[in-house]
Image: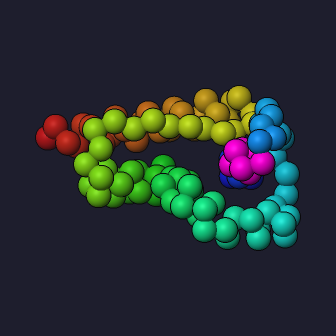
Amino acid sequence: MFISSLRMIIGMFTGKRDYINPPTEMTSDLKEIIQHPQIQNMIKYSFVGSKETVKEKIISFLNKTQADELIISTNVYYINDRLYSVEKFAEVMREINENEVE
């Protein structure tokens, strides 16, 4: 999942945008590219992990930024995985919003 996102970001720099490629192994070249400061800045607010980890990161982000709207992007190759990701995100946001009202 993360490698697909990384390739999309690289495409933005190179102008070679294409459909999301199937997942591949992390290569030494990709490991080197991901350390670049511009890439690190772009993925600074990528929320990856378990449902609880993502929820904690989103709450922290919302507290820091006071944002009242989020736009998500799920660069996942397999459609079922993409749907699962969006469903989990929706669950997290419902939980956050329910706790905010109380």
Q: In this view, does 27 lie above or below 91?
A: below
Residue at horizontal 81%, vertical 41%? Answer: 16
Answer whether residue 49 is visible to the viewer in this image.
no
The reply, left or right, for residue 44 in relation to residue 34 is left
State yes or no: residue 10 in magenta.
yes
The quadrant where residue 19 appears:
top right
The quadrant where residue 86 appears:
top right
> Relative to the observer, which residue lies in front, 20 or 57?
20
Residue 95 coordinates in the image, percent (x, y): 32, 40
> Relative to the observer, which residue lies in front, 68 or 23?
68
> Relative to the observer, which residue lies in front, 80 or 36?
36
State yes or no: residue 6 in magenta.
no
Residue 3 coordinates in the image, percent (x, y): 74, 52
Answer whether residue 96 is visible to the viewer in this image.
yes
Residue 25 coordinates in the image, percent (x, y): 85, 58
Q: Quadrant of the C terminus?
A: top left
Q: In this view, does 98 lie above or below 2?
A: above
Residue at horizontal 56%, vertical 37%? Answer: 73
Residue at horizontal 75%, vertical 34%? Answer: 78
Residue 56 coordinates in the image, percent (x, y): 38, 57
Q: Main secondary structure of the magenta part?
A: helix
Report the magenta residues as a range.
Answer: 7-14
Residue at horizontal 25%, vertical 48%? Answer: 66
